Amino acid sequence: MTARTVISFLMALLLGLCPPIAAVAQGFAGLGTTAEGFAVPQPGKAFAFPSDHGAHPDFRIEWWYITANLTGADGKAYGVQWTLFRSALQPGEREGWSSPQIWMGHAAVTTPERHFVSERLARGGIGQAGVTAEPFDAWIDDWRMQAAAPVAGRDAVADVTLKAAGQDFSYALNLTAEGPIVRQGQEGYSVKSAAGQASYYYSQPFYDVRGTLSLPGGDVAVTGQAWLDREWSSQPLAADQTGWDWFSLHLDSGEKLMGFRLRDSGAGYTSATWIAADGTPSPLPPGALSVSPVSTAEVAGRTVPVGWHLTLPARGLDITTTAINPHAWMATRTPYWEGPITFGGSHAGRGYLEMTGY
């Protein structure tokens, strides 16, 4: 039995001790389980960088999440995803095999014709996966998001390299931030339900990207924009919430919009942050953003809404989104839809859409 086989077996065993994450959307990485024993976000936190770029093992769930909208030298639109998830069986960290931390990585490349996906699992405490804040380094096996050479006055994640590889694809990208870190919600306290579940949430939505995709047809030089989302919490979903529809939008005007709807037994809970071109965030009240599906596709044996109508009257926004590839299905242990989109109407641009629970 190889080391990889042993680790895979142990990971399957450990994941079996967690809530059945593939059974229902709210079990995604333990999001719908009790927070007993874990730290819970509170309003008024002052983020401290670079330390908050690192891990927070007293919270149940955390992620480092990059999506990139790219254009190839061949003229095609591409999308790239790189995600590192940390999920805890117990709060705190310990060295070696006694670590309660489980790590999972997702990587994807989307083209108009194909969607390439890969997944990694790792155990904390043994060096196979982890995050250090300074110098910044996030990794699982040989997948890596790593700070470039430090520059005085620049944030620790302002300049990073991004690498991942799976069956039939790989990528190596350089990301350079041309704007500030953005705190989502109320100064980084992002409420997820009327009952008050919340996460700590900040973004770096101002990356310029250059690099190379390696695909079955050969290497493709790409340029574009990327968006980093950082969240950590212990119970961000309410008991009746079944999944979410999340949008990160780069407007051609230079402005940005983050918005999501958490679906429940009623109208759902929506939240949004309007981000000015200079990075100034304006959090919108719950319900200010309206999202509704306008087209669907049959994906992985289910009907998935892949076209959306979004309105935000406070900003004169009235747009319809279109998926670059309607079949951008993440066939991972916890399956979901994620892929690049374009949009038009009152505003034009491109972005990313993630949907869970379908």
Image (cartoon, rainbow, N blue to C red):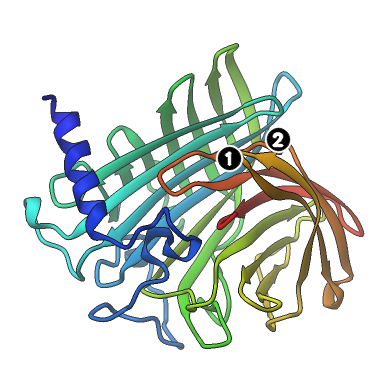
For the question of whether residue 77 can be seen, the reply is: yes
Q: Which mark is residue 140?
A: none
The kind of secondary structure element at disc 1 is strand
Residue found farthest to the right? 346
Extreme residue in the top direction? 217
Residue 126 at what x, y percent from top left? 13, 46
In the rendered structure, the answer to whether residue 265 lies left or right of residue 48 reads right
Above or below: residue 54 compared with residue 290:
above
Amino acid type at image mark 2: Asn
> Residue at point 51% right, 48% down?
66
Tag 1: Cα neighbours inside 10 Å, few (<14), some, or many (≥20)? many
| Residue at 76% across, 79% down | 288
**Where residue 250 sits in the image (x, y, percent)?**
72, 53
Residue tagged 1: 329
Q: Amino acid at mark 1?
A: Trp
Q: Residue 148: image x %, image y %?
A: 40, 41
Q: Position of residue 237 (x, y in %)?
A: 48, 74
How much space separates mark 1 and mark 2, taking CA atoms?
9 Å
Determine whether the residue tagged by mark 2 lies in a helix, strand or loop.
loop
Name the residue beneath numbered marker 2.
325
